[in-house]
Image (cartoon, grey):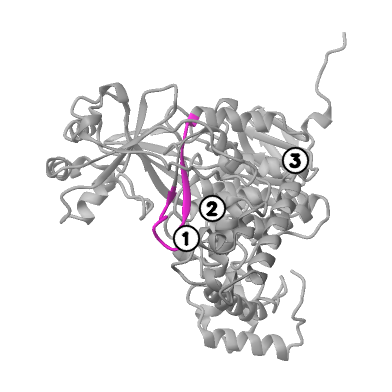
Amino acid sequence: MATNMPSNDYYHFDVIVVGAGHAGVEAALASARLGAKTALLTMSCDTVAQMSCNPAIGGVAKGQIVREIDALGGEMGRVIDATGIQFRMLNSGKGPAMHSPRAQADKKAYQFDMKWKVEQQANLSLRQELVEGIETDDGQVTGIRVSGGTVYRASSVILTTGTFLKAIMHTGETKSEGGRAGEKSAHGMSGALRALGFELQRFKTGTPARINGRTVDFSKCVAQPGDEDPQPFSYLTGKIDQSQMDCHLTETTPEVHALIQANLSRAPMYTGQIESTGPRYCPSIEDKVVRFADRNSHQIFLEPEGRNTLEYYCNGISTSLPRDVQTGMIHLIPGLENADIMRFGYAVEYDFAPPTQLFATMETRKVAGLYFAGQLNGTTGYEEAAGQGLLAGINAALKVAGRDPFVLDRSQAYLGVLIDDLVTKGVDEPYRMFTSRAEYRMLLRQDNADRRLTPLGIELGTVCEQRARSFRTYEDQVRLAQAAITQMRHQGNTLEEWLRRPEISWADVEKMCPELAVLPLSQRCKRHLEVEVQYAGYIRRQETEIAKLQKVDSVRIPKTFNFAGIPQLRHEAREKLGRICPTTVGQASRVSGITPSDIAVLMMYLKSSGYSQQASW
């Protein structure tokens, strides 16, 4: 009797994405939207886009990344707009380059909404599988092997394995396997990567306890409300309509610090049980107490995890201390004296692949068609992971289609800064994005991400028609507004000249010329033009610097270039350039330890050897 067995086509795809965290979902959606038949494989279909740590999206520089993901057609911004429970614009009292949107999420609603987006996406199959190996042929990826021996075939594979590779969780002296509480570790992939010649190292991250809000005395805490006029992340979201929930602020005390100091002998970070490097900019509470011994307190933000739960995330006290110490510590914090701990904090050690093993397309140097994205590359944060996933998904699909790769440079986007930092400089601690990492942050503001990137998304095909129409409408508004302020005058000066004065706002120039107020301009357009005019001098200066940089970055270095064959280069320069294989002279200049004299030697050699400045890589 015949059986209904799946055909071979059931396991044949153009692109396979391994892991359905924040990197994986953006990678899979981008690939499918570019027309590639895509599979998204995850250890559990119940944890798609799950927030393993804090229930929030955005933040300083991270908010800019989310806006850029959105401008290129990604989903993170739209989903947080729909499921956010509090919205704030950070650094609003500083200059516009520092403004960064952040939102608390209803973490389950976010997860379910993103899973729904994945499930209804054409060209995309979500499947529950445990991936154990990578199939290759003569240096080219051909697919992956899952538990039970089944092989999925594809010419492009994207690994987004998060913190699950050989992962070990620590709570005091207790150790257990797993990349997230309640979930197992992935073992086979680490061995498979090493067998292919990849270098792997270990990093550490951590998470704090969660408590029941019913048992918190909020009268001893300071309420932290959202903005009265919440700004959405996505350029397709007209307005944030849902009600907002308060966060609350409390702090540690000297008694808390004394308890932690007394129990450092039981803290895995200080007993040698954990040897891996953790995120310097998000230290554990025990690390804070040791490093900042002169401080009497550290802030703790109590963040609600959703509308339909009383669970609160204790942001600021990430820890791997034993359970009894965590209990004593929390009960010494004002407002938490009777707090019921629902989940204890823990640390996770996991394998990652140093990202200097990648090209700027996110494709690995050792295996063609194999891409890495997310925490596998030594980064931390949902936003950094999602951005990498988006770019890896785009490039994997472009490669399958025989199209040119898509690479953003440092002057175009925070995403360009992120990728260039990773593949050029590498990481010695979990990488986190900051505005200070971007040389051209006045140009890379959160308010203009669509003007910078949506035209590129339209050209690529990652942007839907609705977004394209919305963008063109907005561009028409900007052109109308620009023409109006350069032509309309008040007391002999154009409105643009008036607007350059720091004490003058758009509302002021509307009063000067009431005919400006009747133009069909959105508030966002007005805010954008206000910034563009008032900071025009800084913007022009950065544009001049970018033009100089592009002259150096236009000098291409062939993929097969032999740095070891330049005897005039210092030994360190030959070793580092040969390992990283920069694709342009500009990228070579940003490699750690490379000096201006090294670049001068490289330029002279390229010129004297007759290499084309536009050589393909």
Q: Give the range drawn in magenta.
A: 89-107
Q: Position of residue 131 (x, y in %)?
A: 62, 35
Q: Is residue 16 magenta?
A: no
Q: Which of marks 1 and 2 is nearer the N terminus?
A: 2
According to the picture, the residue beneath numbered tag 3 turns out to be: 32
Q: Do the residues labelled 1 and 2 touch (CB within 8 Å)?
A: yes
Residue at image position (19%, 47%) is 297
* Along the viewing direction, whichever of 536 and 50 lies nearer the viewer: 536
Residue at image position (40%, 61%) is 94
Q: From this view, report whether residue 105 is shown above or below residue 94.
A: above
Residue 140 shows in this picture: no
Q: What amino acid does circle 3 point to?
A: Ala
User: On residue 377, which mark appears?
Assistant: 2
Residue 350 shows in this picture: yes
According to the picture, the residue beneath numbered tag 1 turns out to be: 427
Taking the view exactly as shown, the residue that stands out farthest to the right is 1
Q: How crowded is mark 1: few (under 14 residues within 10 Å), some or many (20 or more)?
A: some
